[in-house]
Amino acid sequence: MNGFIIFSGNSNPELTKKICNYLNVPMGEAKVKTFSDGEIQIEINENVRSKDVFIIQSTCSPVNDTLVELLLLLDALKRSSANRITAVIPYYGYARQDKKVAPRVPISAKLVADLLTVAGSNRLITMDLHAGQIQGFFNIPVDNLYAAPVILNYIKNNFQDDLVIISPDAGGVERARAFAKRLHADLAIIDKRREAPNKAKAMAVIGDVKGKVAIILDDMVDTAGTLIEATHAIINKGAKEIHACCAHPVLSGEAVNRLTDSPLKTLIVSDTIPLNSKSSACDKIKVLSVADLIGEAIIRSHKGDSVTSLFV
């Protein structure tokens, strides 16, 4: 063996297979099943004593099941005397609940960080955290990768001039500015007012989008309410056509129906979260793989090499 072993939960086995192919290693043998009453059963079927172990598991829908799977895998490996256990979480669930937005509410992202650490994680590799400061919730090393290199490469190969990069809210301006700089494109911002959870109203477009190809950039698309409101606001300002990019295609509720009925041309996403059958059937959604990027982070982490060059 290579001195490290990769295991997978049930959330995104296809991504794990691609990562293993990139690293040219077999997937570790583990039983991750469910008892008839819904309890999760974990059994590691190979020796991991003194090994460097990586568990790949996105905490996506069903979020609570995938999270408990990950926690139990961590505990099983810790009790099997693994030397170092790294949780590789391409999509970190509960990340949007990263601060107290009202009295008497939890900071769920911090609780998940505590659970992962107590369960046995010695290190975390994740991608496009909803808020970068979540890294500070951990007392273990955290590598927060970005899908930007993969998405940037796609945009450069498929779009020409007259681009404008759109941030759908004030919080995403820094990300959008970085993309606009690398693409030598213009920048615009949507002034958004959120009236309730998962409900947003786009109010105004700050910047010139008339006659241009607009690309809306976000870290995730959940119900697509924000995205579609932004699309209509940009269309009303005279944009030629509109596309969108995000790292995490959560796509819950009526998201796919909204995308299908909208003037949005394409939604470019990564495979941190697997598409369900309904999302896969939507011809507007284009999936790019981040398997090579995560695989490179894994091999560098194992060898003790720098992963700084991946943080772009």
Image (tube, helix red, strand yellow):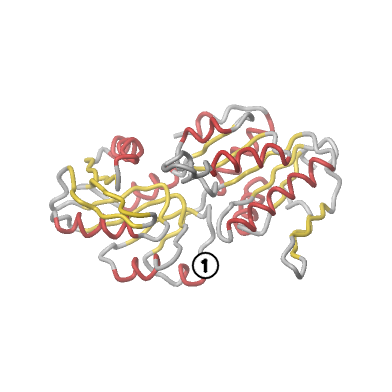
Image vertical order of residue 190 relative to residue 240, above or below: above
Q: Nearer the viewer, residue 39 or 91?
A: 39
Instruction: Tell me which residue sits at (72%, 50%) in the image.
Output: 7
Which residue is at the front of the view, 155 or 177?
A: 177
Give the residue number, with chain letter if any, for mark 1: 276
Closer to us: 307 or 246:
246
Q: Quadrant of the C terminus?
A: top left
Name which residue type carries label 1: Asn
Q: Residue at x 53, y 33 (%)?
A: 135
Q: For the residue carrying disc 1, how many other residues have a C-alpha within 10 Å: few (<14), some (14-19), or many (20+)?
A: few
Q: Looking at the rendering, which quadrant does residue 35 occupy?
A: bottom right
Residue 41: image quadrant is: bottom right
Q: Where is residue 206? Give x, y as percent.
A: 18, 43
**Residue that lies at the very extreme toward the front in this rendered image:** 104
- The x, y position of residue 27, in whole percent, is 73, 52
In percent of width and height, residue 145 lies at 51, 38
Q: How many numbered markers are drawn? A: 1
Quadrant into which the N terminus falls:
top right
Q: Residue at x 60, y 32 (%)?
A: 138
Q: In the rendered view, does 211 fall on the left or right side of 309?
A: left
Percent across and percent down for residue 235 are: 18, 58
Q: Secondary structure at mark 1?
A: loop
Q: Residue at x 59, y 52 (%)?
A: 59
Whether 241 is drawn above or below 36: the answer is above
